Image (cartoon, rainbow, N blue to C red):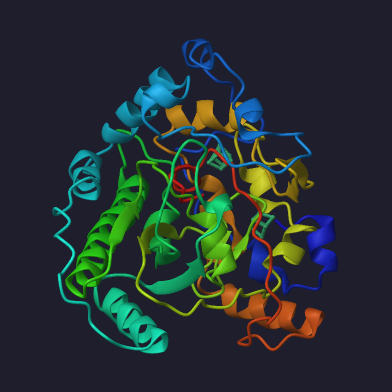
Amino acid sequence: MPNAQASEQSMPEQQVSARARPNPRRPKRGTYRPQQETLSLLKVSGNSINGLGETAERQASPFFWHPPTQHPYEELQNLARRNSRKCPGSAEIFMAAYTHPELISVGKTRSVATASEFTADATAFALMHEADAVGIAPMNSRYVFEGYTIEEPWVIILALGPDYEKLKEVPSDETNGIGVCAIGEQYARGTRSSYALANWIRSQGYTANAYPGPSASALLLIPPAIDSGLGELGKHGSLISRQFGAGLRLAGVTTEMPLIPTAPDRFGADEFCTTCQLCTRACPPGAIAEQKQMVRGVERWYVDFDKCIPYFAEAASCGICIAECPWTRPDARPKLLATMAQRMDWAPQIPTPEPKKADVPSSPHPEVQSGRR
Ligand code: SF4
Ligand code: SF4
């Protein structure tokens, strides 16, 4: 049910309150307690590593889903992976997400075209190779994890849309792997799409590198995704897209190919989150802060790592907050867009021309941490 404040937003009641059948894998509200063995693996507060409460801007530190030599959560990460892979079909699907072709050598002859033509060609190539949406942003130090270097001046973000009917089955377990498998399929598409695009760019004589999830590496993905118009940051720490809602998975390609950036897009998701509490209430460990927090010098929505990650690890990557977000529901999204456009006096299909500074994400969600969220 929408909370009182959400109701005051005059959203049609059914728009945000329709409920699927009860999901037997979700704990009743307020009943979840992490297992002691899980808590014992949380040796250092992830909120400190994330920079919660820090007022100075800085690069994000390597974190969950980075190589375990770069953070103190190796055992917790292994537990999360084991519990995810126990779900029927999950191991094979995630194997596909980690399988990619070799990058080819950069062509000796450079194709000649305008930045506008290259942008159109690269976008069309990505859309023909499994990406659902494409954003382009000039490289920024905020997009790069501390300790890494990326030389290429452009980042292309590929968005892979969710299958809502499967996503709402989360969390997964040994009896039902539909939700986590759907997420794995998105990652596999992102891996294939990003490597295909990087190799196409290389064939044109320009350097390109691929940064797909779920493993994390040098590139954060959500900040350039926001800056390039793929969505806004939601209270649950995931991207909310006007086209796909929450639940997008992201992959990145960095390149020196001359490109034209795509514009940020504001359609009211951030404003809607200020009064909606659906994800806050649905989160079993109560990890989603109701108000924005100061994180590395930016006031932003924040998910408490120390509360989220034990449940995330025990419940096969969870995903409840994303599935419960009303923007994720295909039937609700058009009405939400129209309502927010009316409220903000924005046309629903016209992106705001003003650039929006991306919040620096630091949520424990896997897509965030792979430079993805
Ligand atoms: S993924 Fe984390 S924040 Fe989202 S519902 Fe699950 S435990 Fe809560
Ligand atoms: S992220 Fe989604 S569920 Fe959470 S407050 Fe925002 S709109 Fe509501």
**x then y, percent, for residue 68:** 38, 24
**x then y, percent, for residue 59:** 59, 42
Image position of 27 with respect to 144: above or below: above
Give me the residue at 71% from left, 71% from top.
268
Give me the residue at 52% from left, 63% from top.
225
Give me the residue at 53% from left, 61% from top.
224
**x then y, percent, for residue 148:** 44, 40
**x then y, percent, for residue 63:** 49, 32
Instruction: Give the quarter the ligand 1 occupies.
Output: top right
Image position of 338 with respect to 23: above or below: below
Left or right: residue 3 versus residue 161 is right
Q: Quadrant of the N terminus?
A: bottom right
Q: Is residue 49 visible?
A: yes
Left or right: residue 49 versus residue 258 is right
> Residue 349: which quarter of the image?
bottom right
> Residue 85: which quarter of the image?
top left
